[in-house]
Amino acid sequence: MTTVPALHPQAAQLVARTVPIPDPGPLLDLLPQGRAVSWVRRGEGLVGWGEVARVTTSGARRFVDAERAWHGLVRHAAVRDEVGLPGTGPIAFGSFAFADSSPAGGVLVVPEIVVGRRGSRAWITVLGRGPVLPVAESRRPVAPPTSPGTVTFTEGTRSADFWRNAVATAIERIDAGRLGKVVLARDLVARAGAPIDVRWLLRRLAENYPGCWTFVVDGLVGATPELLVRREKGLVTSRVLAGTIQRSGNDERDLALAASLARSSKDLEEHEFAVRSVAEALTPHCSSTNVPESPFVLHLANVMHLATDVTGVLADGTSSLSLAQALHPSAAVCGTPRQAASMLIEEIEGMDRDRYAGPVGWTDAEGDGEWGIALRSARLDAEDPCRLRLFAGCGIVGGSDPLTELAEAEAKFIPIRTALGTDR
């Protein structure tokens, strides 16, 4: 199913105007309370608010239908773009369910106002529906975000014991040669004493994890370290993360842990599966690809990952959203072989992942864009503003241990827990 606002054909025309602006200050500080979208890393990126159009899709065709609807919106758009960078002109922010069967489906949101920054350049895009180009608005003061108050946590869809048993089952299947790797996820439920202001989470996530992409789209909020795909002027980039170790808080100890991670046969095997799946998915769309021979260790505030940046030169004009579809789900969030891993997840994981581990990001009218994997994330409850569902997952391979994997999953809950005001 795909829905687009039903408007009179003439009034339905999308119009957009982008103009340069002075430094607007921290992008996340611009967001008003209510519906907001964000894609920010190290102070650069895009934020938006208001809503000109919304596209909702479902099922196996959720990406295809979203792309078609977006093309329909921008095909005859009236655009005045005085900046001319990726991320200017008409912009849609999106997030998509991990699984075809998930009722969470997919969504593209076209905001009324988008403010962006890249390097020393900043801009504002104002979007509307009708024959007249909108006038760029100046910054308006916004109320500060409010604290969620006291937060309590309870088990999610399945208990920790259930999840450990699922990991043990996965290891048995892997040892039996059924597959090479599978990623299993679990959830946790947070209940706040006051309605959760998403801006409170965004600011704390951006402060604690400046190297991650801090995002919110349609109630899905998080700070992902993993760039599924970036398409920019013909260059394609994907950052692959697989293989994780928790930081100790001691710099010397963390250096030793990073070295052990870089030598770990279990983690290197997991990482190789993920890199191979990305390279294979990009190859049909690129005239050349570059895959580094060995990963580097990415240091985040709470964990370290093995990381590899895969790059390619786009050959067929495929949009960033279609590239995200081609890459999803990678071995980093599903496993390998993909079909066998997907079937095992459905059999033993015991929950709907919603939009966790699905693509989240943005696209412009030219097809350029950035799509991350929705990791270190949570979904706001549409009916209960005090409820939040957190997600975390771990890659399981032949050398995995259920207790160790459970500890890793708990560590991956920390970003959202800390953003809510607690790390316990």
Image (spheres, helix red, strand yellow):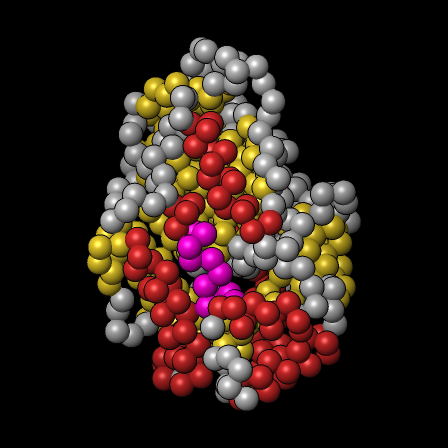
Specify whether residue 310 is in view.
yes
Residue at the (57%, 14%) spot, across then down: 8
Image quadrant assignment for residue 82: top left
Residue 243 location, x and y as percent? 45, 74
Image quadrant assignment for residue 326: bottom left
Q: Is residue 12 magenta?
A: no
Residue 268 vs residue 315, the one in the foreground: 315
Q: Residue furthest top?
A: 132
Residue 367 location, x and y as percent? 36, 39
- Quadrant for the N terminus in the image: top right
User: Which region is colored magenta?
Assistant: 324-334
Q: Is residue 332 magenta?
A: yes
Q: Is residue 17 left or right of residue 412?
A: left
Image quadrant assignment for residue 311: bottom left
Q: Is residue 86 left or right of residue 112?
A: left
Q: Is residue 355 above or below residue 51?
A: below
Residue 287 vs residue 39, the one in the foreground: 287
Residue 217 vs residue 363, the one in the foreground: 363
Q: Is residue 336 above or below residue 240?
A: below
Residue at the (49%, 61%) spot, across then down: 329
Q: Is residue 241 above or below residue 8?
A: below
Q: Is residue 421 left or right of residue 396?
A: right
Q: How many marks?
A: 0
Residue 353 vs residue 239, the one in the foreground: 353
Q: Residue furthest left?
A: 288
Residue at the (69%, 81%) spot, across then down: 165
Q: Is residue 192 left or right of residue 335?
A: right
Residue 377 location, x and y as percent? 58, 56
Specify whether residue 220 is in view.
no
Residue 375 location, x and y as percent? 53, 59
Majority secondary structure in the magenta region: loop
